[in-house]
Amino acid sequence: MLDIENLERRWLYYKIEKALPFAILSVFSLLVLFIILAFLQSQKVQKIKKTPLIKKEEEHLNIKKVEKKQPIKTSSFKEEEDVKQLITLTPSLSFIDKISIEEPKTIKPQIENSTVERQETPKEEEKSKIIIQHQDSRKDIQDVLKRFHKNNNPVLSLFIAKKYYELQEYKHAYDYALITNNIDSHIEDSWIIFAKSLVKLGKKQMAIDTLKQYINHSNSKKASMLLQNIQNGRFK
Amino acid sequence: MDIALFESSKNAFLDIVEAKEYIQLDRISMVYQSLQESVQKPLKMIMLYGKPGTGKSMFLTKLYNDLKEQQPIFFYKTPILDESEFFKTLAQDLYGIKYNDTLNFTHFMKIASANPQDSTPIILLDEAQLYANDLMEKIRLLSDSRIVKFVLTLHKTEKEDLIAKEHFQTRIWESIELKNASKMELKLYIQKKLMKANCFDISNMFTQKNITLIHQLTQGNYRDTNKLLYTLFEIYVTYIKKLKKINTKNISNKYIEMAAIHTGLINA
Ligand SMILES: Nc1ncnc2c1ncn2[C@@H]1O[C@H](COP(=O)(O)OP(=O)(O)OP(=O)(O)O)[C@@H](O)[C@H]1O
Ligand SMILES: [Mg+2]
């Protein structure tokens, strides 16, 4: 069942986070407005206070007023820029969230490990062409894996199993055939790859038993043929 | 409202590719019709392409289901990687011939010419971008010789765009692009799915604002829409189980957003 309280909380944060820039912006613009108004007000008061006292100084004061006004105006602009900076900061925070959400994937590191393994194993005599092909396969696997995690489509996990089998990584082939089987146990090819990988992993008897079991309730010709070939030693 | 109604609405949006789940929408039906017509012409290979979740596999499944009674048609859902195995499978499916040893292209062509067929068999290849270039080349030759007619789907990524340039942009190809739904289509899609599941009352709960939000979140992608709505109804079910008072007059945008957070369409 859904953890609805947690979801509600996340939704609230999401709403706040979404509203935050606007809130900050409006608070700051209000503040700026307030400062300007307050300043203008104080100027007026000063003017009123000063005019009756010293008439001669008026011209001098006027210039001062202009001088005073300018720095304050620019400072208010600066504040607005600060506001903008504050706003641009928030999306980057959510980006960090995103990373931390995407991190805990279980199968991905396995693949990365095996990439390392694989790149170490090819003998130096091997032609560069073959290596390129292998890397292509790797990329295929990783692309498909990404999509598999999104849609849990057995067609894709079966592809991964087949690809690993082709790369002679039978343990992985076995794993993904099993995963495929768990999603949909009626796919003939996943049983075939499963059994073939078992033989390659030296578990011939287990392969035979599995195939027999499968043939019993599917009448698969392909499986019978493989069973024969395993039993008479043509497939090893 | 009855909790069972929300349960069946939820299940209506399970991500399943089955012919009986197929939904007709104007644009989709038109594309489908042209696909059915092209399939009957012997000359060209047909390529369906489009982003993930736009219904390519659904299309093939539907086509397979509609034609399988009338003519020989075979559906390979997962690419067959090994060349020999590919031709062995073909020989088995098309001519009922079993091969234990390796079977290469030349040998297969000999078998094919020894076994002429009344009507050209159709082979549907899903996820065709995963076939190796060499094998793809032979598939093309096979198609050229009119021994079989291929319809294949291509999952579009940058790498596949490249492939599309090399192989697929020749005259022998007819290409059909599948796209995400427009807002209007998405509305119909949701309504029709719910109608199919006999959830009329639920279907009536959707407002234009709901649809706009859903379209904004999913960009009209069918798979994402499935996920989103599945979770949306799961939220409703959960609330009802918890005996919380909820508005059953309209769908709440808040719950849609919560579903989007849960499915990762919104990062929060
Ligand atoms: N015409 C349709 N009728 C009903 N449901 C559909 C239709 N088109 C797509 N869908 C739904 O969208 C989901 C995704 O469609 P599908 O698996 O065919 O996409 P795809 O294009 O093959 O994706 P990918 O490139 O990832 O393989 C399906 O599970 C199905 O529920
Ligand atoms: Mg597909």
Image: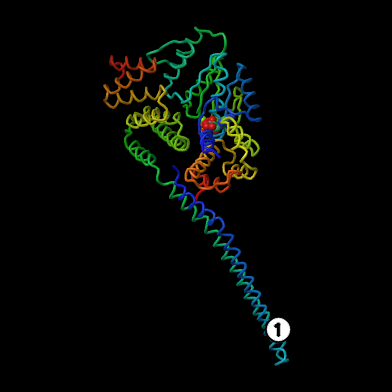
* Residue A197 picture location, percent across and down: 33, 26
Ligand 1 neighbours mark 1 (CB distance < 8 Å) = no
* Residue A87 picture location, percent across and down: 56, 60
Quadrant in the picture for residue A211: top left
Question: In front here: B49 or A188?
Answer: A188
Find disc 1 in the rendering and name its residue: A62
Q: Residue at x 35, y 25 (%)?
A: A194
In this picture, residue A90 sits left or right of residue B41? left
Question: In front here: A100 or B40?
Answer: A100
State the scheme by which the image is colored: rainbow
Q: State the SS at label 1.
A: helix
In this picture, residue A160 sits left or right of residue B168? left
Examine the rendered structure and indicate whether residue B225 appears above or below residue B88.
Answer: below
Q: Residue at x 66, y 30 (%)?
A: B26
Task: Check the residue under mark 1 and report the chain it is in.
Answer: A
Screen quadrant of the C terminus of chain A: top left
Tag 1: amino acid: Asn
In this picture, residue A47 sits left or right of residue A164? right
* Residue A199 picture location, percent across and down: 29, 23
Question: In front here: B11 or A62?
Answer: B11
Q: Residue at x 62, y 68 (%)?
A: A30
Quadrant in the picture for residue A130: top left
Quadrant in the picture for residue B61: top right
